Amino acid sequence: MKPYTNLQHKKVLVLGLAKSGLAAAELLHDLGAFVTVNDAKPFEENKEAQQLLEKGITVICGRHPEDLLDEGFELVVKNPGIPYTNPIISDAVARGIAVWTEIELAYLVSEAPMIGITGSNGKTTTTTLVYDMLQAAQQQPKIAGNIGTVACGVAREVTPANVIVTELSSFQLMGVSQFKPKIAVLLNLYDAHLDYHGTFEGYAEAKFAVTKQQDASDYFIYNADQEVVANYAQRSKAQKIPFTTAGRTEQGISADATMIYWQGDAILSRDEIALPGEHNLQNILAAVATCILLGSDVQPLQEVLKHFGGVKHRTQFVAEQQGVKWYNDSKATNCLATKSALLAFNAPTILLAGGLERHHSFDELTDALQNVKAVITFGETKQRLADFMTDKGITAMLVEDVTEAVQVARTLATKGDTVLLSPACASWDQYDSFEIRGDAFIDAVAKQ
């Protein structure tokens, strides 16, 4: 860990605990800051707060005092999910107090170079691919960020021989100031989290923070096939590495129907890539480019691509039963993600979809329905989604939940069909997370 001294004897407020708040508070304490932690969960139920109190860290639990900032804090480190409309955060901004997420702390103390991967869709798949490829190339990677491992906890343990592969959400990137990854990746930009950011422009600016501090010694890998991303890329001061699936190019990394090219030279055959879908091909291009820039040989990357079948809950192959293939894409919480999943399959498909009602349009699915033979809907949107599909000439059936959807799908599916859970909606009307929803699907498929 770098001997970062700029926080010594400074008063720092950590707002919100869970894993990221706990790791940030412990790191700040070890860096010599005077740390106060504020969390809504009552102290008696708050194991993290109890753990921090034992270390001599001040904890305020069960409420968020409105006058908390009167204590003279010089920095707030917040949980990424806390919006900037939160009274304490908006007060901090008004007072000119810096507001960070723990990603900034990770960068400041890490001895290892960092890779920052962001985008509206595909972050976890790309992050996992880069990690697996670097492992195969014996590059000693560590994985961190929005994928589930707290970055500042990882950063304090690494050495210069490691590289930290970091999945970054827009929430995390809003709280960075000096963060400067050696390689930044921007996969795509679509309307998302507008309830948090307010506008698409605000959301896109948060994503662009992944490259904002980069310079000519760094690399910025971006989606040249999406105009809005390409336009943002022009503002980056890093060395620009475009990726495209529109055919061979002389710059960056590209693909046509048969090959992947690096700077115009053929390096990989697409025939041996296990992961289906055009959207996943974009993820693959970004991942391969990242590893090549870090000095990896192509051969271990190819070996990973031969066997990589996807990340759990993201177009995950679950089973083949009586000639029917079952896929879990529970992470598809918006129409774009479901559209991408549907376009990845050529077989007749039974789609399982529905969930939290956010009153979003389903029109984006229209161009991806050519292979859909039936739709089974559930959750708050089930009637509206069923009506949409019926208007498109597709048979729709309404059920209570994912488990019942699997049962009905068994009665409809025949040999050669694909059954795809890709809800196009968030899970929170019936399930606490998309992971729990996906696990319910996996369990139901196993009970044949």
Image (tube, grey):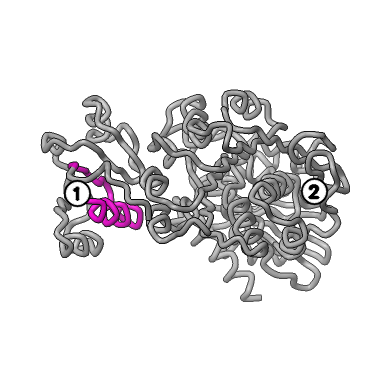
Q: Position of residue 272 (x, y in %)?
A: 83, 60
> Magenta includes 350?
no
Residue 26: image quadrant is bottom left
- The part of the chain drawn in magenta is 10-34
Q: Secondary structure beneath disc 1?
A: strand
Q: Nearer the observer, disc 2 or disc 1?
A: 1
Q: Residues within 10 Å of mark 1 (few under 14, many from 20)?
A: many
Would residue 67 be found to the left or right of residue 235 on screen?
Answer: left
Residue 417 seen in render: yes
Against 397, residue 414 (above or below) is below
Q: Mark 2 near mark 1, Cβ–Cβ under 8 Å?
A: no
In front: 303, or 444? 303
The residue to which callout 2 is attached is: 371
Q: Position of residue 175 (x, y in %)?
A: 38, 37
Mark found first going from the N terminus, 2 or 1: 1
The residue to which callout 1 is attached is: 35
Picture disc at residue 184: none
Q: Residue at x 81, y 47 (%)?
A: 260
